């Protein structure tokens, strides 16, 4: 199982202890590249696994650009077969 964390929210709920932050702007290309680099690192450390599920959490993962979600899914399924 793969968990992908998107640590940004529109506003910060006062009770929230999670890794979530409000930012006026997010460098989307840098975050996409960092997620893909992290996936590549984990893939070489965990070869030969099968991917049963991908969970996008946050933060507010619905704020992720669809292109970034697609890139993460494509990379994950390329690293580990379903
Ligand atoms: C961290 S949020 C991420 C998803 C989305 N942003 C949301 O609020 O539903 C996931 C769940 O954790 C809950 N949560 C936030 N802060 C918490 C805390 N300090 N203790 C327990 N649950 C918390 C939220 O209410 C929400 O149901
Ligand atoms: S992660 Fe969820 S609970 Fe935490 S600040 Fe964002 S919207 Fe609120």
Image (cartoon, helix red, strand yellow):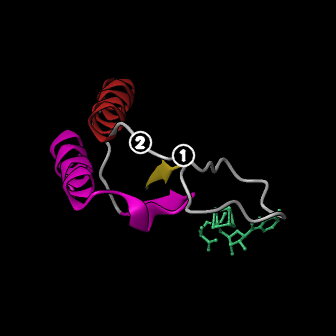
Q: Is residue 67 left or right of 51 when viewed as pictured?
A: left
Which residue is drawn at the image coordinates 29% and 51% (left, top)?
A: 50
Please tell me how crowded label 2 is: few (under 14), some (14-19), or many (20+) other residues with Cα within 10 Å. few
The span picked out in magenta is 53-82
* Inter-mark Cα distance, 1 to 2: 7 Å
User: How far across and how far down the image is residue 29, in percent?
Assistant: 26, 36
Q: Quadrant of residue 48?
A: top left
Which residue is drawn at the image coordinates 28% and 31% (left, top)?
A: 33
| Mark 1 in CB contact with mark 2 (< 8 angstroms) | yes
Residue 58 among those drawn in magenta: yes
Please tell me how crowded label 1 is: few (under 14), some (14-19), or many (20+) other residues with Cα within 10 Å. few
Locate the C terminus and report the quarter of the image it occupies: bottom left
Identify the residue under disc 1.
23
- Is 76 in front, or is 29? 29
User: How far across and how far down the image is residue 18, in percent?
Assistant: 71, 53
Q: List the single residue furthest toward the front.
A: 24
Residue 52 is labelled as: none
Which residue is drawn at the image coordinates 41% and 68% (left, top)?
A: 62
Image quarter where ligand 2 lies:
bottom right
Residue 57 among those drawn in magenta: yes
Q: Is residue 30 above or below residue 58?
A: above
Locate the N terminus and report the quarter of the image it occupies: bottom left
Q: Is residue 43 left or right of 59 when viewed as pictured?
A: left
Q: Label 1's element?
A: loop
Residue 26 is labelled as: 2
């Amino acid at each position: 199982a793969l968990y992908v964390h998107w640590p940004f929210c529109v506003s910060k709920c006062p009770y929230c202890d999670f890794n979530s932050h409000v930012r006026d702007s997010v460098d989307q290309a840098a975050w996409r590249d960092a997620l893909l680099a992290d996936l590549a690192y984990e893939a070489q450390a965990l070869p030969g696994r099968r991917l049963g599920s991908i969970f996008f959490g946050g933060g507010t993962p619905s704020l992720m650009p669809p292109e970034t979600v697609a890139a993460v899914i494509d990379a994950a399924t390329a690293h580990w077969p379903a």
